[in-house]
Amino acid sequence: MIGRTPRRTRPITRARSLLFVLATAIAPGCTNDAELVVRRLRQPGIPLAGLEVTALPVDPDALLDSLAAAARRPKPVFAGLEREMASFRADDTPDTTGSARAIRAWDATRDSVETLADTLRAMDRASLAYREAYARLRGLYERLGQRAGERDRAVQGGLGRERDLAQRVARAADSLRRWEQVAYADFPDRLETAVRQSGRDVRQIPTDSSGVAHFTLPPGRWWIQARVRDPHNPFLERYWNFPVTLTGLVAVAVPLLDRTAIIRWRH
């Protein structure tokens, strides 16, 4: 386990990132009378603005747990490698032309996903055009996952004296992605079904220049999810997924604190 947390550490998955697709493709609900303010505290090396904060009416990690428990093969475990990653610090990690290209390709694909998802908001979900556009969106997301892997491997390949560690991490990450592709294949459909059954919708808002994401949500129990990279360790990120209950009687403010985050492998 990496870091101190009441829950076990889990690597980032392609399935979890599909929350972005749901948050942009599902239209907002009609009842909005509870205020939630999520604040990201300043951290050296990480800008306050632009952190995507997601509010979900269901617990996505609980769905992932159930799928993992039902998987035909157990999830690959790399305990020793995770300990090596946790102890790594790279204050002077050099960039390379290859990693810069990989990052630009990933950024361009992410922009395409966001643009198409925005288009879906205004479309009739029952129309053939919507179904075709949603299929293109899922295809774009698959490409985004591939380019995320290329980006990570390119960045890790420039770690100089730690190249051996980076190569072993890349191989392990590929193994985990293959397992997740099978074990979590039903996650998008199960999450979308659970969200629709809740009668509420996924919302995603980026933090502003002061690190604040302001939500107006129907009252009830919500799960707040966010992630931010570790500025000193290219292998790790801080991840939040915690419940909050909104009554609509008073505004609720919650901070994203480092001590409440799960430190996990950002594969």
Image (spheres, rainbow, N blue to C red):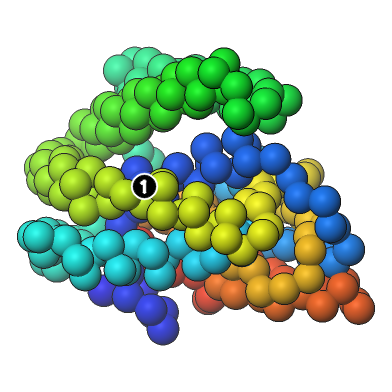
| Residue 176 position (above or below residue 151) | below
Q: Amino acid at mark 1?
A: Ala
Tag count in the figure? 1
The quadrant of the image that shows the N terminus is bottom left
Label 1 residue SS: helix
Can residue 10 be seen in this snapshot?
Answer: no
| Residue 34 position (above or below residue 124) | below
Residue at 21% from the left image edge and 70% from the top image edge: 69
Which image quadrant is residue 27 in?
top right
Q: Horizontal placement of 39 versus 106: left or right?
A: right
Residue for badge 1: 15
Residue at 85% from the left image edge and 58% from the top image edge: 32
Residue at 28% from the left image edge and 46% from the top image edge: 185
| Residue 102 position (above or below residue 252) | above
Residue at 36% from the left image edge and 47% from the top image edge: 15
Closer-to-camera residue (38/183): 183
Closer-to-camera residue (202/88): 202
